Image: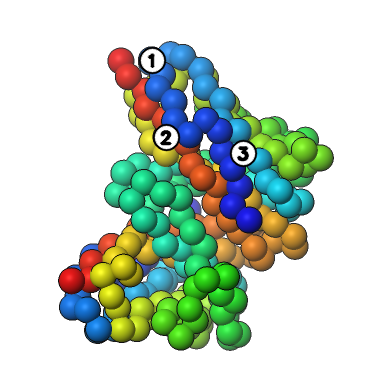
Amino acid sequence: GAVVSQHPSRVICKSGTSVKIECRSLDFQATTMFWYRQFPKQSLMLMATSNEGSKATYEQGVEKDKFLINHASLTLSTLTVTSAHPEDSSFYICSARGNGNTQYFGPGTRLTVL
Amino acid sequence: QQPVQSPQAVILREGEDAVINCSSSKALYSVHWYRQKHGEAPVFLMILLKGGEQKGHEKISASFNEKKQQSSLYLTASQLSYSGTYFCGLEIGSGNQFYFGTGTSLTVIP
């Protein structure tokens, strides 16, 4: 089956710093990647959709200057949380989709901002 | 935009059946179902692409009513391993918008 990796799996940082999360499709080419955020006991909320080589489409209420998404290749997308604050602490999950309709999820990154 | 699931939570004894419903206010392109264990990423269960399609995976199956913009997940003869939070995922429009439902917490007890 298709495998998606995320790195790091867990990160703790100080308030005001930036954090980069990588999402890689290991054995297929991902034309579309999705970034989600999940707070405890809540559903996954779509943050943005990115297609390789084009700008990401952000959901309403998600600040594009704070959550920078780069989908530079068919196997890599990055999410950078700039000037992170404690309220940005969450579980961030990416998913990747190739030519079919199925989304394959990464294992998630737990971000804690102190 | 977020699809609504019902019930929010359900507790079953091993061997009992359950139905989880997912409703959308928008026309659907496809329906996906996932199960998430605590602290882990969602695991894909199945996808339904056509209105009226039904699919099965062991004792877990699903239906898709395109007209009603609804999907239902059926779990029969539940096992302890079925415990987790179930999410529907709906592709809306031409398929480049994807939203998870509100989630249903399912607990199977011996």
Q: Residues within 10 Å of mark 3 (few under 14, many from 20)?
A: many
Mark earlier in primary sequence (3, 1): 1
Q: What kind of element bears circle 2?
A: strand
Q: Residue at x 46, y 55 (%)?
A: A44
Res A59 → quadrant: bottom right
Res A76 → quadrant: bottom left
Q: Nearer the viewer, residue B38 or A84?
A: A84
Label ID, residue B22: 3
Q: CA distance from mark 1 to mark 2?
A: 14 Å
Q: Residue at x 54, y 57 (%)?
A: A103
Q: Nearer the viewer, residue B60 or B12?
A: B12
Mark earlier in primary sequence (2, 3): 3
Residue at which label 2 appears: B105
Q: Nearer the viewer, mark 3 or mark 1?
A: 3
Query: Residue B93's x, y, as percent?
Result: 74, 60
Position of residue A12 in the picture relative to residue A108 (left or right): left
Q: Residue at x 48, y 42 (%)?
A: B103
Residue at which label 1 appears: B13
Label ID, residue A46: none
| Whether residue A7 is situated above or below residue A38 in the rendered picture | below
Q: Chain of mark 3?
A: B
Q: Amino acid at mark 3?
A: Cys
Q: What kind of element bears circle 3?
A: strand
Q: Chain of mark 1?
A: B
Query: Residue A47's x, y, as percent?
Result: 50, 68
